[in-house]
Amino acid sequence: MARNDVDVVVVGAGFAGMYLLHELRKLGFSSRVLETGTDVGGTWYWNRYPGARCDIATTDYSYTWDPELHDEWTWSEKHAAQPEILRYAQYVAKKHDLYSGIDFEVKVEEAEWDEVAKKWHVHTSTGETITCRHYVMATGCLSVPKDPDIKGTDRYRGPVYVTGRWPHEGVDFTGQRVAVIGTGSSAIQSIPHIAEQAKELVIFQRTPNFSVPAINGPQPADRVARLKADRATYEAEAKLSMSGVPIELPTVSALGVPRETAFEMLEKSWQRGELLSLGATFMDAGTNRDANEVIAEFVRTKIRSIVKDPETAELLSPRGYPYGTKRPCMDTNYYQTFNLSHVRLVDLNTKPIRSITETGIEFGDESKEFDAIVYATGFDAMTGAIVAVDITGKDGLTLKKKWENGPLTYLGLTSVGFPNLYMITGPGSPSVLSNMMVSIEQHVEWIRDTIAKMRDEGFETIEPTPVAEEGWRQHCTDCADITLFQDTNSWYMGANVPGKPRVLFPYIGGVGRYRKICDEVIARGHLGFELKGPKNASRVDGVVREIQPDVESVLEAMALMNLPTMESMSPADARTFSEMSSTMRPPGPEVGEIVDGTLPGADGPIEYRLYRPATPGPHPIVVYYHGGGWVIGSHTSDDPLCRELCVKSDVVILSVNYRHAPEHRFPAAADDAFAALQWVAANAASLGGDPDRIAVAGWSAGGNVAAVATQLARDAGGPALRGQLLLTPAVDGSKTYPSMRENAEGYILTKALMDWFWEHYADPSDRSHPKASPLLAESLAGLPPAMIVTAQYDPLRDEGNAYAEALKAAGVPVQHLKAKGHTHTSIGMVDVLPSGKPARNEMAEALRRFFA
Ligand code: N01
């Protein structure tokens, strides 16, 4: 095959391009690897600034595909420095004869898809056009330095250095007055070294960063021992971990322990000298702002304890954005550097740079001369290097145009309209939120296996489907939505480059989950891809993940616990089991007052719990019916949800302990529900409520009795109700809906459990009675406005949907929320699952509207 007509063109000879070249050769594919630099190493070739080191311990930042390397190469330090990592890349390239497959000093300028030939034409800076079946961008996530975006940069006549393009021969700053602009990772690593040489060093800071000490030294003995004893297990754990480094997952909330204990725990993490340690101290650091603030304040106390000048310490202390939402830095003596008399910090918020001049910098009301300026101003991250090449796909569509409002990819690997184009660690993959080595190897292997399958099965092209791509965008958004990342101006969000769309560029669902998804895509016949060949075609369309990521995590954790099923227990044991589980959940918000009491049920007294807001009354009253399949639960079992509804809707919630089956079968629960409603209406004023503003609410079986009580009130001519809020209600026990089969297992409420509940509650013959199945009422006209919430992965979904539709058809105003990616139980899990919060907010809003 001609050199300019190959199976695969790979752009970039960093760790990704090198490994891919090795794999392609192994499988007999012809390839060209094109690299702008003069050597291999990618990021470690370009970033030669003083102090450049790997922030991930280098033991974890090593290739795993050549096991011999583990014996042949020993890292001299825990966090090896750039020259050593570059030597490692060169060593591997020599050992595997990779140099012979790489063209250096070649820049790829354009690539266009040829729909007739089903090939890419790649145009390079040397004037060559290379035709290839597959085109891989292995261009790295942080490879295009961003424009510093500062007035006057072209005026300066002295030497200018950019951290990401550092001179190969190094720079000697001895005796010089040096300015460093920026305080990201590159600056924080280089500043202590520049300070050692410079006569005077001024650091221009726009946003202070969180930095943890590397505590560098030899490779940690315990890690080395672990790897020696069982490397395979270690590597497998890394692949399924959150960030590509196996660390123990936290189980403690930062808010669940006293501040002193939290700080002791953080001190231990600090002393570990690992990039991920601080953030991994608490389970809620990434999702709860208050929990995150505990870490932020800990770092600020550290800064205050190191930096002697209190004003400088304060300026260096990050405030106003959560820890981890800008990439945390790792340093050796960064904060200590500010104790040196020739080092000065300038806060650009109070002294902005007016202009760079021919000889220095004008800032605030000052003007200073410098012998050298260092720009540590970062990169056009994630997409910069990809769209720097003019890539034109099908129908003349360019990738740049397609990504105008944010990158659209399937799995961060491929994009609709660009057949046979692959991105290694592209946007929408864990990439920069992971140990890059783990993510690089995974993508290389995924691409390798895919193109090998195509060759073996006679396919010429592969392209994701629009449905799959949109589903992936939504899943990435779902993952991002439950984190604290969105409000921070970070390069993760594209905020460092003016005009760049503001989305979270990397996938934040975790390395392990991501890998499982990619494997699942392949196992399901390349789900979400269309593959075409001259003689055959395959299209398995669909969305690979619709479940909310936090819901999935809870389901996975529960599956690991291997708990007995409730239906295998006696009702008494099921109740005890359920009560025990409830003791472990967060309590929900504080309310003004809680009052426990009894009220007359249909056949004797029943208990209730009243939740009163802290605001002055009288308040509207919502009579609430708990979930638990008429068998388990009580007036206190939905405590966190009742508290939250009380606070958010500013209403009194009165939760009723209606009688339970099998001791009290149908229609005891329904009769008690109605009796409670009547009693509340008659006693509203003495309960501190407004008798004219009463509504009902209920979850699951509680939604069932709430709906029934509403119908009974209508039929009895009162009490008059303002509304009904039904959360994943059971409304028809007379037949099996498709969702009961679809979601029969795996989502906590199972078909078997629902059958068990019905068996305990009502005879089959009774289940057609509207007091058991309110959907079957003769008429639904004249009922109060309803808010109905149904969940995608709930066996009861379709009957809830049917009730919403039937109410609408009967002229009842209905707000129907179909909670995407949720289960029967997930929406009500207050302070456990952030993804349920929007639905609960809408529920609270609906209650307010009922009474408006
Ligand atoms: O770049 P950055 P970096 N005027 O974008 C400031 C990886 N990395 O090269 O925060 C004034 O983080 C900007 O201010 P602000 C790592 O993932 C890894 O340091 O935008 N200031 C910020 O302080 C890292 O996150 C390693 O307000 C301006 C700084 O410049 C990523 O690369 C080592 C400005 C840029 O910080 C990027 O790090 C190094 C302006 N006009 C890097 N424009 C290792 O693992 C920008 N800034 C070893």
Image (spheres, rainbow, N blue to C red):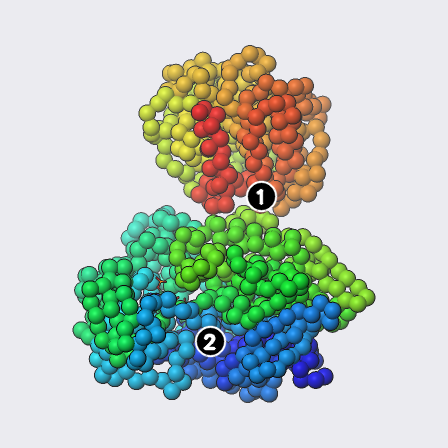
Left or right of 688 in this view: 657? right
Q: Residue at label 2?
A: 43
Q: Which is more toward the observer, 734 or 758?
A: 734
Asked whether mark 2 lies closer than 8 Å to ligand 1, one says yes
Reading the chain from its start, which is encountered first: label 2 or label 1? 2
Q: Secondary structure at mark 1?
A: strand
Name the kind of residue labelled 2 in the image: Thr
Q: Quadrant of residue 415?
A: bottom right
Pinpoint residue 316: horizontal percent, then vertical percent: 27, 62
The N terminus sits in image quarter:
bottom right
Near mark 2 (Cα within 10 A), the count class, few <14, some 14-19 or many ≥20, is: many
Q: In terms of image quarters, where does ligand 1 lie?
A: bottom left
Asked whether mark 1 lies closer than 8 Å to ligand 1, one says no
Near mark 1 (Cα within 10 A), the count class, few <14, some 14-19 or many ≥20, is: some
Q: Residue furthest right?
A: 535
Q: Residue at label 1?
A: 820
Instruction: Say the numbered circle drawn on residue 348.
Output: none
Question: What's the distance in space between the residues labelled 2 and 1, CA to CA?
Answer: 40 Å
Q: Which is more toward the observer, 362 or 385?
A: 362
Pinpoint residue 304: horizontal percent, then vertical percent: 23, 61
